[in-house]
Image: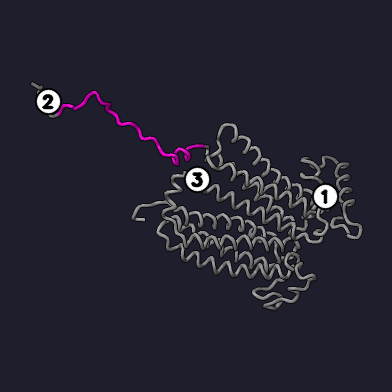
């Protein structure tokens, strides 16, 4: 006869009292692999070094100190001239490298030293960005800090940094591509274009590394496809606008027209297609470059406003705020651009305009990112 059991007695005491822990899936395990926070800090340091190079180069050209000096990369070695004799030798190298028919842009040692420090600082910022990338890649390969699946992406950043140096080498004044030596705007546009593409990729990677792969996959289910598509169009227009701005800066042509909205009193300014052969106008005609730069600005405002109207209707608060900030910076850039025209491209306005370009790239990418990967929130919003 079986023993009567108490109704409060545990049944099956031999069975384990604790339930086994469910192992996470492959996505969760991959999300925890690699030091994502460390990688974000590393990418952020490269971002600031590269931004300093681009903004410093723009301001040096504006101040008339952007004379490209001949020498290796980095300029005459990492260390600058350390005494009077070394400065004279560097100045002689500069004069010897000039074409015989061209008058020197710098005629005395004091002006040469000012130009040298600007050029040296810009190149060292670029060298620092490349060195930070190389050291980071080597460091992450040893202790397995590299997040899973990110090796090729981060290697691509290094390839873009190498392309900036290649553009400087190929299109610079050292004579490696003689047919293009009369088009300094090409060198500036190539370096600026690749540089801002690099900044954009780094910013996008920092945003993605801020959340786990599992969180990104879950957030993507709630994406706003229309807002993402419109912000993608805005992103491409911003990069095109930066490219034509660099073509203007390469010819130091920001002071060519000081009226707005007309250009020299005309809707279609004279000389817009004055160069022969005609295709030279596409990269070396400052009138055409400024005309396109202004036209892209109007188009950017139109598309940006449409994107903002769509983004402000998003159900996720952070996504709405991201589109608000994008619109604020976009209209701020318009004001700075008009001010730069009306005040003859004064350096402090142009400095703010260049800083604003970096901020606008980041804010457009952030709005685009949150349209695709929104943060989940409660039903109360």
Residue found farthest to the left: 1
> Residue 26 colored magenta?
yes
Please state if 65 lies on the left or on the right of 301 as rendered: right
* Cα distance in 3D space between marks 3 and 1: 42 Å
In the image, 327 versus 286, the foreground residue is: 286
> Residue 111 colored magenta?
no
The residue identified by callout 3 is: 210
Question: Residue 8, position in %: x, y?
Answer: 15, 29
Q: Give the range drawn in magenta.
A: 8-33
> Which mark, residue 211?
none
Answer yes or no: is residue 111 visible: no
Disc 2 element: loop
Q: Which of marks 1 and 2 is nearer the N terminus?
A: 2
The residue identified by callout 2 is: 5
- Single out the mark in the foreground, 2 or 3: 2
Question: Residue 346, position in %: x, y?
Answer: 70, 63
Q: Do the residues labelled 3 and 1 touch (CB within 8 Å)?
A: no
């Amino acid at each position: 006869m079986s023993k009567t059991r108490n109704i409060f007695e545990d049944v099956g005491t031999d069975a384990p009292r604790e339930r086994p822990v469910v192992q996470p899936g492959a996505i969760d395990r991959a999300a925890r692999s690699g030091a994502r926070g460390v990688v974000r800090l590393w990418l952020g340091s490269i971002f600031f070094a590269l931004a300093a190079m681009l903004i410093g180069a723009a301001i040096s050209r504006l101040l008339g100190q952007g004379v490209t000096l001949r020498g290796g990369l980095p300029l005459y070695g990492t260390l600058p001239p350390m005494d009077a004799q070394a400065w004279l030798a560097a100045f002689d190298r500069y004069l010897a490298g000039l074409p015989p028919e061209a008058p020197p842009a710098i005629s005395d040692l004091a002006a040469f030293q000012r130009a040298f420090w600007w050029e040296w600082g810009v190149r060292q910022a670029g060298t620092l960005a490349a060195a930070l990338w190389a050291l980071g890649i080597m460091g992450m390969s040893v202790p397995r800090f590299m997040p899973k699946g990110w090796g090729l992406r981060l290697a691509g950043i290094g390839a873009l940094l190498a392309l900036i140096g290649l553009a400087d080498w190929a299109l610079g004044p050292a004579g490696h591509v003689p047919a293009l030596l009369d088009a300094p705007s090409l060198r500036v546009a190539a370096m600026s274009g690749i540089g801002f593409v690099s900044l954009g990729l780094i910013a996008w990677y920092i945003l993605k590394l801020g959340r786990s792969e599992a969180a990104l996959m879950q957030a993507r289910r709630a994406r706003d496809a229309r807002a993402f598509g419109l912000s993608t169009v805005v992103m491409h227009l911003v990069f095109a606008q930066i490219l034509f701005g660099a073509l203007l800066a390469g010819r130091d042509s920001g002071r060519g027209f000081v009226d707005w909205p007309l250009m020299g009193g005309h809707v279609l300014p004279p000389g817009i297609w004055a160069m022969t052969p005609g295709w030279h106008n596409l990269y070396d005609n400052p009138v055409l470059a400024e005309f396109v730069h202004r036209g892209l600005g109007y188009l950017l405002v139109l598309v940006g406003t449409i994107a903002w109207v769509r983004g402000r209707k998003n159900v996720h608060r952070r996504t709405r705020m991201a589109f608000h900030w994008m619109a604020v910076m976009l209209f701020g850039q318009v004001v700075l651009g008009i001010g730069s025209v009306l005040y003859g491209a004064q350096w402090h306005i142009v400095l703010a305009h260049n800083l604003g370009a970096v901020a606008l790239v980041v804010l457009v990418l952030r709005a685009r990112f949150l349209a695709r990967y929104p943060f989940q929130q409660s039903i109360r919003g």
